[in-house]
Amino acid sequence: MIPTEDASARKREIEEKLKQEQETLSFIRENLEKSDQLTKGMVSILSSFESRLMALENSIIPVHKQTENLQRLQENVDKTLFCLDHVISYYHVAKDTDRIIKEGPTGRLDEYLACIAKIQKAVEYFQDNNPDSPELNTVKVRFEKGKEQLEAEFRALLTRYSKPVPPILILDAIGGDEELEGEVTLEHLPEAVLQDIICISAWLVEYGRNQDFMNVYFQIRSSQLDRSIKGLKEHFRKSSASSALLYSPAVQTKRKDTPTKKAPKRPGKDDVLDVEIDSYIHCISAFVKLAQSEYTLLTEIIPEHHQKKTFDSLIQEALDNLMLDGDSIVTAARRAIMRHDYSAVLTIFPILRHLKQTKPDFDSTLQGTAASTKNKLPTLITSMETTGAKALEEFADSIKNDPDKEYNMPKDGTVHELTSNAILFLQQLLDFQETAGAMLASQVLGDTYNIPLDPRETSSSASSYSSEFSRRLLSTYICKVLGNLQLNLLSKSKVYEDQALSAIFLHNNYNYILKSLEKSELIQLVAVTQKKAETSYRELIEQQILTYQRSWVKVTDHLTERNMPAFQPGTKLKDKERQVIKDKFKGFNDGLDELCKIQKVWAIPDKEQRDAIRHAQRRLVSEAYRAFLQRCANIAFTKNPEKYHKYSPEQVEDMIEKLFDTSA
């Protein structure tokens, strides 16, 4: 059993806890009641807020919608007003642009084009929206006026700033001097002006719908191109009065197209002719260079699909004038041929060579032009080749057929004018071997000459084959001329009654031919088809020397043993025997006097040949004379030996030494 005290204590403890629990329960209940009250209050507030919010929403939404409508209406009004302003502006375009259009685009191109753009938009507006309105006609007229002003400005700018290229600048451009840094640029228009012209051209193409400005362009630029070339010609014409051409100080033009070896000139006339040749050659090069430059300029200004046609028109005047000048040269050459002045035909050679050298650049420059334009240079080349070939053939015939006129023969037996002219002509051909060879080949003269070709040639390229064939053809032609010359000289030599003078004449001419061949490249050219030409001429020369030496036989024949009397020293000669010796002395003396008198005025221009012939003759005569004197030394054939012993051996030698010396 639990003690009573413990049970009472335990009861009190339990009651104590129960009381505390009851107090806690009461506290919780009170708090729950307060919470319920707060919840009810919050619910009441939220319900009130919700009702108020709904009321606010019901009142705000209609206002918002009304505001949106008002904003939309405002935007519509603004757009309408803008459109009205825009439309109204078209009605004022004519008035607003009147001053600028009247003043023109000069110096204000950008502003002017902006003004034209406004007028153009007005035209488009009225055409689309009110095609019957009078305003459309007004702005159309204003647009056309503006376009005319632009076309006029295009013409004015080109006319004002298109100037002929100065001759000095042209010579710089075509000089090709490697020492110059870079290529000379030809600036035809100032950059600012060029940009304005390009701008106007672009507008006229896109909006003007008019190609007349292209005609204006080619007419103005064509005139300047032609004037540039004429200015270069005038430059050469003026410079012909001085000894040296007035080339640009920057470039001394390398004229590879003019002869390096020139013939003796007739004063005045040939100098002018050389200048004309130089002038034409430079004008051809100038045309190519200027035309290329013009095309570069044209591509910046003219629409692509009109460029070739415009360029074709642009170059016609200058090209036609060049071709006319070339035709005049050909005509002059033909007249020279008719007068048998074949040296004048040589003017064609440097020009023809230059035309052929320039032809690739010509063809490249004229690419895309009309066939008639491209054919102009080939036509001129063909004409020159035909004329040149005719001149070559007629020259060869003239050498063969030159008449044997006695009054035209050199009295001293020196070189005939026909020989010097023929050699001079052939030497001048050396500077134009390819040109002359091609000239002959172009006329198919190979069939005439019947030149055999090396089979190996046919395997080479066309160009080398042609070059080799042309060289052989030219070699054969030169040999033909020399052959004709030799035959003619032989015929002319028969005009001389004295066979010795005839021999001296042939010797001089053959020797002149040989020395001329050896001093130039002619000998190598002749050797292409005649390997032994040099040997043949030497043999001919020796033959004539021997023929000449035979003329002295009638002198030296008196010095021979023939008819000399046989005698013993101290034996008195008979009258007949003494007379034989007297006749021999007299025959020798008279023959020597006669020959020396005659041959003293003959000429052998070649000092080496002259000395050799005199030396050989002096030795032959002197030896025979000394031997004769020695034989007659102890023979008393006369009481007056000084009468017959007229000359000492030294005097005889001195007389012979003065042969062929007109100054002695």
Image (tube, grey):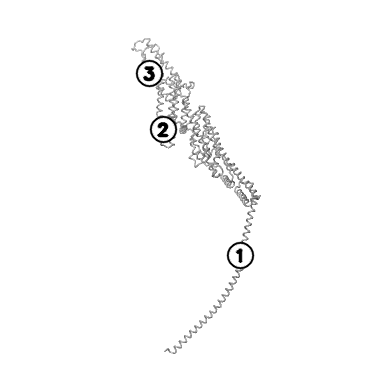
What is the crowding at mark 2: few (fewer than 14 residues within 10 Å), some, or many (at least 20)?
A: few
Q: Secondary structure at mark 2?
A: loop
The mark closer to the camera, 1 or 3, is 1
Task: Give whichever of discs 3 and 2 has the lower sequence position.
Answer: 2
148 vs 657: above or below: below
For label 1, the residue is 65
Image vertical order of residue 41 relative to residue 468, above or below: below
Is residue 644 or residue 187 the one in the foreground? 187
Residue 624, label in figure: 3
From the top left corner, tell me how far across and down residue 352 is, in percent: 49, 34
Tell me whether the residue at label 1 lies in contact with that at label 3, contact meaning CB atoms closer than 8 angstroms.
no
Closest to the observer, 563 or 223: 223
Q: Is any atom of residue 188 visible in this view?
A: yes
Q: Indicate left or right for 284 with 151 as reference.
A: left
Q: In which quarter of the view is residue 509 placed?
A: top left
Q: Position of residue 279 (x, y in %)?
A: 53, 34
